Image (cartoon, grey):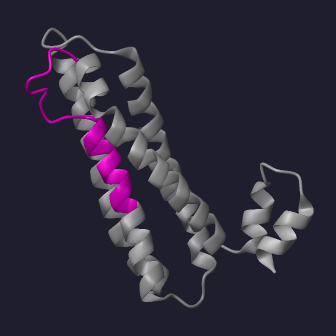
């Protein structure tokens, strides 16, 4: 088995647990809608994180081109997957506990959610850079200064 496959099996299990956590939470919401009022913003974030997890798994296939894996890259990929799980766990509670509805829950967890999303964005940039300069440059830059990108990569 190639090392990429070895790493991605474990990362896929972690991301699979994240998706399962989201789906189980949504199933609880559907099964007992009278328990707590849903909040549309919270539901949009659930849909967004669900798609993020699916797309993450798809885009990580780009790591198959890496010939020489290091322990640091192995840990990076696994922690990236764990971060996705944490996003799902923060977004979808196993129970609402003291909160009256999902709006109150969402606002109580917003700092964690947006903090984890900020970390996720940084790791996503690093992940794209690890896949190679050509991959990162193909994504485009938010600024148009080619001299800045040339200095960054030289």
Residue drawn at point x = 37 percent, y = 67 percent: 79
Q: Nearer the viewer, residue 107 or 38?
A: 107
Measured from the top left, where is residue 122 in percent x and y? 54, 58
Q: Is residue 139 above or below residue 33?
A: below
Measured from the top left, where is residue 95 in percent x and y? 12, 30
Q: Quadrant of the C terminus?
A: bottom right
Q: Is residue 17 left or right of residue 127?
A: left
Q: Is residue 106 above or below residue 18?
A: above
Residue drawn at point x = 24 percent, y = 19 percent: 104
Residue drawn at point x = 60 percent, y = 60 percent: 125
The image quadrant of residue 149 is bottom right
Q: Nearer the viewer, residue 127 or 111?
A: 111
Q: Is residue 62 magenta?
A: no
Measured from the top left, where is residue 11 in percent x and y? 37, 66
Which residues, given as a range, are shown in magenta?
Answer: 81-101
Measured from the top left, where is residue 105 in percent x and y? 23, 25
Residue drawn at point x = 44 percent, y = 25 percent: 44
The image quadrant of residue 150 is bottom right
Q: Is residue 150 above or below residue 90?
A: below
Which residue extends farthest left? 98
Q: Is residue 30 left or right of residue 72?
A: left
Q: Quadrant of the N terminus?
A: bottom left
The image quadrant of residue 34 is top left
Disc tally is: 0
Q: Is residue 91 magenta?
A: yes
Q: Is residue 53 left or right of residue 106?
A: right
């Amino acid at each position: 088995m190639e090392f990429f496959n070895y790493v991605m099996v474990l990362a896929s299990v972690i991301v699979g647990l994240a998706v399962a956590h989201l789906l189980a939470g949504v199933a609880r919401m559907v099964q007992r809608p009278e328990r707590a009022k849903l909040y549309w913003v919270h539901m949009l974030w659930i849909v967004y994180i669900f798609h993020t997890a699916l797309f993450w798994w798809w885009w990580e296939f780009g790591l198959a081109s890496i010939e020489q894996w290091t322990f640091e890259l192995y840990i990076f990929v696994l922690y990236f997957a764990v971060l996705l799980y944490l996003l799902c766990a923060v977004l979808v509670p196993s129970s609402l506990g003291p909160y009256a509805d999902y709006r109150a829950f969402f606002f109580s967890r917003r700092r964690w959610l947006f903090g984890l999303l900020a970390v996720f964005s940084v790791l996503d940039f690093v992940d794209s850079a690890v896949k190679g300069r050509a991959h990162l440059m193909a994504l485009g830059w938010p600024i148009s200064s080619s001299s800045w990108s040339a200095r960054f990569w030289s």
